[in-house]
Image (spheres, rainbow, N blue to C red):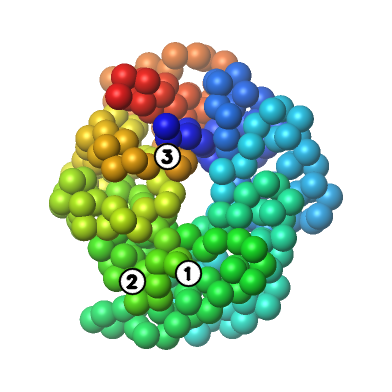
Amino acid sequence: MMKISVFTDEINREDPVRAVQLAKQWNVDFVEVRSLPGGRFPEGPDTELRDFFKMVDDAGLQISGVSPGFCKCAIDDPSVATVLAEGLPRACEWARRAGTDRVICFGFKRDDSPQVPQAAIDRVAEMADIAGRHECRLVLENESICWGATGLEAAGMIRQIGADRLTLCWDPSNSARAGSAVPYPAEYDQIKDLVSHVHLKNYDPQQNCWSLIEQGVVDWPGQLAGLADDGYTGYVVVETHLSVSPDAFEFVDTDLAGLENNTRRNLQYVQSLLSNG
């Protein structure tokens, strides 16, 4: 059975206490960590991280993974050396303290090169080895502005590095934004052996904007059914990316802000798909 998780900053970006409280109210057992008031994980002070993870634990929730956002920059950005020497080891240390070994990264900002530069592949491989030495698993997320924009491109990088060192965080909506016409089933069927983590949102290519999970181009009923058929029992993580009220959609709870309402709607939709699957 797949495990539903949600990014805390996709519930409330400013108030992690409220985000955790709402996740608990919405019967979510897992949350994913990206940004906190002190910065993107793990940039904040130790006290903030310690207090946040204690709050999650006290609420009876568990951490599905951490997303430090490493390597959305250019390959030759000076910050990369700091990430390798300090940022990634710190992320792994705090991930393990929080009860997870799953650290998500990206494949470096795209340039005009016709194919993925070997330097990007080598750097991601180096990061995977660093994570492994710190008892964590690196997971490459496909992201439209980075190398590894689609699932297929990210899979090509992973296969060069080795699936024993690196796996895929499959985000079909990011793939759609990068130009994939049919993320599921056409693309998924070629990469499913590498998928170890899944992020859920949706994308409207006609409007060039994010949408509710039930409304965009990605066939989420089919994708979740396909994952189930393939024996996937990992996390599916709601990543709403939508703060405004979509057309013809009325908020179900006027006490919730726009992002909160949209994430609640997305969670209810995903929960219904999995319960009926």
Q: Nearer the viewer, residue 134 or 83?
A: 134
The residue where tag 1 is placed is 165
- Left or right position of 27 against 82: left
Q: CA distance from mark 2 to mark 1?
A: 10 Å
Q: Earlier in the sequence, mark 2 or mark 1?
A: 2
Q: Amino acid at mark 1?
A: Arg
- Left or right position of 98 against 164: right
Q: Position of residue 270 (x, y in %)?
A: 38, 28
Give above or below for 150 relative to 61.
below
Q: Is residue 89 visible?
A: yes
The residue where tag 3 is placed is 233
Give above or below for 39 relative to 75.
above
Residues at marks 1 and 3 touching, judged by CB atoms closer than 8 Å: no
Q: Nearer the viewer, residue 159 or 256?
A: 159
Q: Earlier in the sequence, mark 1 or mark 3?
A: 1
Q: Position of residue 10 (x, y in %)?
A: 52, 38
The residue where tag 2 is placed is 159
Q: Amino acid at mark 2?
A: Arg
Q: Is residue 35 visible?
A: no
